Structure formats: C-alpha cells, structure tokens
Image (cartoon, rainbow, N blue to C red):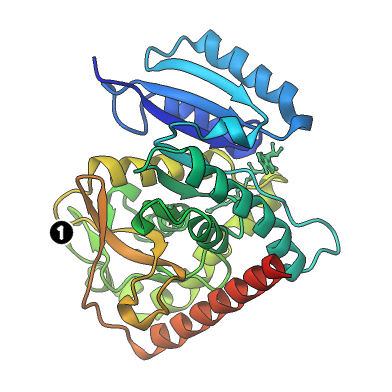
Amino acid sequence: LKQPIKVTVTGAAGNIGYAFVFFAGQGRLFGQDQPIDLTLLELPNSKRPMMGTVMELDDCAYPLLSNIRTTTSLDEAFVGCQVAVLVGAKPRGPGMERKDLLSENGKIFKAQGEAIDRYADRDCKVLVVGNPANTNCLIVQRYAPSIPKQNFTAMTRLDQNRADSILASKIGVHSRQIRNLIIWGNHSATQVPDASQGIIMNYPQAGMVTAARGAVSNDKWLTTEFVETVAKRGAAIIQMREKSSAASAASAACDHIHDWFIGTQSGQIVSMAVISDGSYGVPEGLCFSYPVTCQNGRWQIVQGLQWDELTKQRIAITTKELVEERDLALQSLAA
Ligand code: NAX
C-alpha cells in the first residue's frame, strides 16, 4: 500500500470544509489507491462541530482515511503537511469594508504562511479557497519563503466549473462535454471567463465553442451574458439557497487538487490562480488565474493565447484590482 499523503484542511467545520473532508475520504483527491492522513484545523470556538465532523467521518469508515487528527493550534496543524487546503477565513461582516476584510485575512494567512514555512513538508502544496482567495494566497506564499513559489495556488476552479455548466445548459449538452473554458485573473466579480479556447466534445463532432452553434456564436452571448452569469453565479445561488455555495466549492477544490497531482488530460486546459512569473504581462508575484496544464504534480501556464479587445480591457481591470488588493493587504501587515 502507498504511504499516506498528509493533508491539512483549515475551516474544517465550516460549510465547504464539511463537504470537502467527505469527498477527500471518498478518494476524490488522489484516486482510490492513495491513503490520506487528515488533519483538521479550526478556531477554538468551532472545536465541537469539528469533533462532530470527525465522528461522522469515523462512522463512514472510509478505507482511504488512515488517520484523522484535529487541532486548534497553528503549531500542530501543518507538521509534515504535504497538501494544505486553506478554507477557513474571516467572512465579510456587516459594514465591513474591503480594506478591513483584506487586513483581517492578511493576519490569518500571514500566520498560516509562517506555520507552513516552519513545519510543513519542504514540497508542501497549498490551495487557498478562503476569500479573498488570490490575495490570501499571495500573503501565505510571501510568509513561507522556504517553500517553492509554484506550490501556492488559489481556487478559480469553481468559476471554471460554473462556466462549463452555464454554457452546457445553453447549448443543451452535458458539462463534461465542455472543455478549455478559461478563467483569468481574480476570483471576484472582475474575473474574466473566456470561451475563446472552448471546445465541445462530440457535438455533433468535437469543435470550438465559438463555432458550435449560431445562437452562441452570433448573438454576442458568449462575450456578454455568459461572462456576467458566470461571475454572478455565486450570488444567484445565495439567493435561492439562502446560503453560499458549499458542496460545489468543495467539489471544485477536489478537481483542482486532483488535476494538479494526477495531471490534466492531453489537450485539456484548466484554470488555477498561481503566483505569476510575469506571463501575459501580469505583474510578477501577483496570484493570478491562468489557463494551465498539469503533469507530474507541476502546472504550466498555457502560453501564446490571443485576447480580443474586450478581453484585454477586462483583464486590465481584474489585474488592477489584484494590485490594489495586494497593496492594501501588505500595507496593513506592515503597519
Ligand atoms: P464558513 O463560515 O461556513 O466556514 C469557515 C470556517 O472556517 C468556520 O468554521 C470558521 O470557524 C473557520 N475559520 C475561520 N478562521 C479560521 C482560522 N484562522 N483558522 C482555522 N479555521 C478558521 O464558510 P464557508 O462557506 O465554508 O466558506 C469558506 C471560505 O471559502 C470563505 O472565505 C468563502 O468566501 C470562500 N469561498 C471561496 C470560493 C472560491 O472559489 N475560491 C468559493 C466558495 C466560497 O465562497
């Protein structure tokens, strides 16, 4: 049997964490032959729901969960950690400004970065889900300088999956038939869903989304309503469910980690926010969502794609927002 992979999940008793740990137990991260040592981190006041979650995990008797630990201590949470899934974050309270949100989360993710730097496996891979995800990821990375930069990622896979699902229902195919829709930039309202590389598999034969159907290609739906519907999907779900997306976010986190570790299929592009190396003119060091392919546990940015004028303008806006977030977060940490 393989050695277990040590996975730490923060915010494990929250909405997303609660769904994620069961998916992990079912083998969604690394497949059915890879055991997992799970460590759950929560705030002290959520210790009881965290223990209750573990009782349920025990009752599931998942063969892949070789060990489950809980802690409320940052000094314990990341010891030997190989995969850190950072879900817990400070939510935006009433009357709270963006600046306050960035500053509160800056503190949390600075402390987690320092703990990862000190205690985690030297090749620990990090996925940040907690919002503002891109900037939280940038902070964690800055405070964990001994871990390779490319090991820090933030989640835009939910946005990608939403884009797939929205386009699939417009065309009348299954989401699984949609490939290579891209999310650029920030996981926020300024994100840039881009269907220009999209492929529909088996409809009626494989082809580009933009050429697949008159209704989609001609009426500008792809560059207007589609983009808006993807960006506002989270709000639309809150309106119906009266709670924010939880299982779909946890499922997207599994997709992200799975593809990162196991690899993307030949010709398949997925979106991940990663620490920019300057590709596509994005400032180096920003955590920016790019189209990537993955192989052998490494991602690679897909280079050389062309942007039309509208996409260019949108990407400038999301980049500017990320620069502002970075500056606000770093300023408040330096103060
Ligand atoms: P919940 O409020 O249900 O759960 C968060 C949990 O984190 C709580 O149990 C809390 O006690 C814990 N927590 C808070 N600070 C912590 C800390 N410093 N250390 C350990 N645990 C801590 O939120 P939930 O709905 O699960 O959402 C979690 C985060 O995901 C939020 O920031 C949310 O905005 C973000 N999202 C990100 C998405 C993405 O695509 N990147 C999509 C879904 C989601 O909105």
Determine the quadrant in which ligand 1 lies.
Answer: top right
| Foreground pick, 310 / 215 | 310
The residue at the point 19 percent across, 45 percent down is: 296
| Residue lying farthest to the bottom in this orientation | 309
Q: Which residue is mark 1?
A: 206
Between residue 330 and residue 313, name the one nearer to us.
Answer: 330
Q: Quadrant of residue 189?
A: bottom right
Q: Is residue 64 above or below residue 240?
A: above
Give x and y (percent) for residue 37: 43, 22
Residue at x 70% of width, y 44% of height? 243
Q: Residue 263 location in percent, x, y? A: 22, 45
Q: Is residue 18 visible?
A: no
Q: Secondary structure at mark 1?
A: loop
Q: Residues within 10 Å of mark 1 (few under 14, many from 20)?
A: few
Q: Is label 1 within 8 A of ligand 1 (CB to nearest ligand atom)?
A: no
Examine the image and state in which quarter residue 70 appears.
top right
Residue at left offset 53%, top offset 55%: 140
Q: Quadrant of the N terminus?
A: top left
Report x, y in % for residue 264. 22, 49
Q: x, y (%) of residue 298?
A: 25, 51
Q: Amino acid at mark 1?
A: Ala
Q: Is residue 69 left or right of residue 304?
A: right
Q: In the image, is 286 to the left or to the right of 238? A: left
Residue 315 in sight from this viewpoint:
yes
The residue under the point 46% across, 48% down is: 127
> Does residue 134 sit above or below 309 in this rendering?
above
How many marks the image carries: the answer is 1
Instruction: Classify the position of the C terminus by image quarter.
Output: bottom right
Residue 66 in the image: above or below residue 98: above
